[in-house]
Image (spheres, helix red, strand yellow):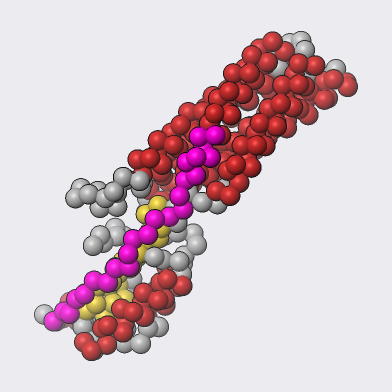
Amino acid sequence: MPTFATRTDCVHLTRGPATPVRRLWVVLGLTATFMVLEAVGGWLSGSLALLADAGHMLTDVGALALSLLTAWVARRPADQTKTYGYLRWEILAALVNGAALFGIAGWVVYEAVQRLNHPAPIRTGLFLAVAAAGLAVNLVSLALLHRSREGSLNARGAYLHVMGDALGSVGALGAAAIIWFTGWTAADPIVSVALSLLILIGAWRLLRESTEILLESVPRSVALSEVQGRILGVPGVAAVHDLHVWTVVSGMVAMSGHAVVPDLDAHPGVLEGIRDQMASLGIGHVTMQLEVADECEEVRTAVGRPRTSHSHLGHSHRH
């Protein structure tokens, strides 16, 4: 059997983008307050768009509260049983938020179809006033969360919820204007359906990304073939195998693998080179095992098969 010289090199684990806790508290307060006002306004005016947006806001209140709880839990330090800490609670919250958005959109479409079949009178003046106030509140909330829209999935989920509310207010305002000038009450449910489709687009993206992280898929921003090529390009590396790249939490990409480095004296330089190459790809947590020979290749040679280096994607090694 070949002799192995192994060493693990880990870049310090760094946290991904933080969730803006204070801003989320302000947005939660604004959303909860106006949710009640919009529900009352929708009931009094007879507007489905307002009631739908109030229902959306109700889910937003729960989603924002969940985001705040998750942000608090995620800050708990790692321990002997959870070596990455509680960071992935953020991804679970994003998954729940995305699923909730799907449910809301389905409810709005159902109610819109019912309203088209059975039109109801609408108090347009009240409808218009409440929709305008709702848009103003949502624009303030969006401004508060704007900087964090490309941050953590948790913050992005909250931003998408508020964006959905803002779109709902725009649609409600447009429907109110149409009814005010033309008397065409069908504009209310039709606008509601259009808005639900926009909500579904954001929900699908959120669900897709959170699911990919939970499945430890290779991040879309990283090509596994490029990772392998970069490692093979480091002087002293003869082969690479058992290569894995995954996302721990949004903004934190990890990699592990085995590199064949026959020259023992080259090991320190190889580790430094691999770390630099991975950093240039946005991979901040690197775990590499260096070997003087590839055990898998030796086994193939022993049974008369050609020696070839290999790399495959599977369960990641945790060091």
Work out whether residue 240 or residue 16 is closer to the camera in this orientation and state it: 16
Q: Residue at x 31, y 45 (%)?
A: 76
Residue 226 at x, y percent in the picture: 45, 73
Was residue 144 drawn as part of the magenta stretch in this picture? no
The vertical placement of 158 against 253, above or below, is: above
Q: Is residue 201 visible?
A: no
Kindly report the secondary structure that dominates the magenta region of the rendered protein.
Answer: loop
Q: In the rendered view, does 177 fall on the left or right side of 93? A: right
Residue 56 at x, y percent in the picture: 58, 27
**Quadrant (top left/top right/bottom left/bottom right) for the C terminus:** bottom left
Q: Is residue 41 visible?
A: yes
The vertical placement of 298 against 155, above or below, is: below
Where is residue 16, by image quadrant? bottom left
The vertical placement of 146 against 45, above or below, is: below
Q: Residue at x 29, y 58 (%)?
A: 315
Residue 1 at x, y percent in the picture: 11, 80
Q: Residue at x 46, y 72 (%)?
A: 280
Q: Which residues are magenta?
A: 3-26
Was residue 21 drawn as part of the magenta stretch in this picture? yes
Work out whether residue 288 or residue 12 is closer to the camera in this orientation and state it: 12
